[in-house]
Amino acid sequence: MIDHIITERQRDLGGGFTVGRVLPFARHRMVGPFIFFDHMGPMGFAPGIPQTLDVRPHPHIGLATVTYLFDGEIMHRDSVGSEIAIRPGEVNWMTAGRGITHSERFEKARREGDQLHGIQAWCALPDGKEEIDPAFAHYGATDLPMIEDKGLSMRLVAGKGFGAEAFATHSPLFYAHATLDTGATLELPPEHPERAAYVVSGRIETEGQTLEPASMAVFGSGPAPVLKALEPSVVMLLGGEPVGERFIDWNFVSSSKDRIQQARADYKAGRMKLPDLDDKEFTPLPE
């Protein structure tokens, strides 16, 4: 059964870059380890857009970010030395652990214009792994499993599910991008205790209700829910094992409020290293 239907809320990340925020939600903060879910776009950028639209260097602890694009390009740089452009169908998986900083810049859009559309999610790290070393991994579209069935095309973005496995994650989870023709059906993985479906476009019927674009259905325990496309649809599927209570403050996630306060103090005092290739400006700590 459906526990909640969450409709995205508009949030300005600064400089006029607006996203649709889905998680965290007041009545349902997490789905498995997923504690944050932002829908970016679709939006058009004209050539010469101001640099204020970029996401300047900023910090994280206690989580892994997973960035996935349907359209456009973002340049990623971080404090472990990574520099790579992410493009449609690819995944950037950045493990913050005990602390990392990174930036996301729209350099292609600034040069020649671009269409941006994608999802950025955060997965809270489980107990015992919150303070692991920071790391970054990029996976190309051909590195990720594709699942094809009648009226269905699905890429497994991360984790394990639907009879396939992408790359190893820090706790059991699944995350997938599904495209369904009208009338196509899809069952969410029964082995994961927490599951959700977010409609990017189209309309989906499940558990006797219709899901419209920009809405997420969070399912309770019980039989695996089945989705049916009422028209051509794109859906993100996510879930996994819960990791326990987590606190979130700005870009910091932890099981300890004291650890978050320490991270705030470290960043404010300049003790969190900025990306080597992008250290001339940063996002100030919000007070």
Image (cartoon, rainbow, N blue to C red):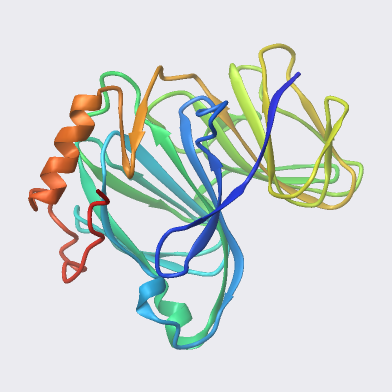
Q: Between 86 and 33, which is closer to the camera in this rendering? A: 33
Where residue 220 appears, as percent x and y from the top left, is 67, 17
Q: Between 165 and 19, which is closer to the camera in this rendering? A: 19
Question: In terms of image quadrants, where is residue 244?
Answer: top left
Asked if residue 274 shows in the view, the reply is yes
Work out whether 244 lies above or below 226. Answer: above
Work out whether 75 lies above or below 262. Answer: below
Quick one: which residue is furthest to the top in this view?
Answer: 222
Work out whether 5 lies above or below 213. Answer: above
Where residue 188 appears, as percent x and y from the top left, is 70, 27
Residue at the spot 41% in from the left edge and 72% down from the top edge: 53
Q: Between 39 and 68, which is closer to the camera in this rendering? A: 39
The reply, left or right, for residue 130 in relation to residue 219 is left
Where residue 96 appears, as percent x and y from the top left, is 27, 41
How many numbered circles are shown? 0
Quadrant of the snapshot with the N terminus: top right
Question: In terms of image quadrants, where is residue 249?
Answer: top left
Residue at the spot 11% in from the left edge and 43% down from the top edge: 266
Asked if residue 89 shows in the view, the reply is no
Where residue 257 appears, as percent x and y from the top left, is 25, 26
Work out whether 158 lies above or below 112. Answer: above
Q: Between 27 and 126, which is closer to the camera in this rendering? A: 27
Quick one: which residue is furthest to the front in this view?
Answer: 287
Residue at the spot 60% in from the left edge and 70% down from the top edge: 43
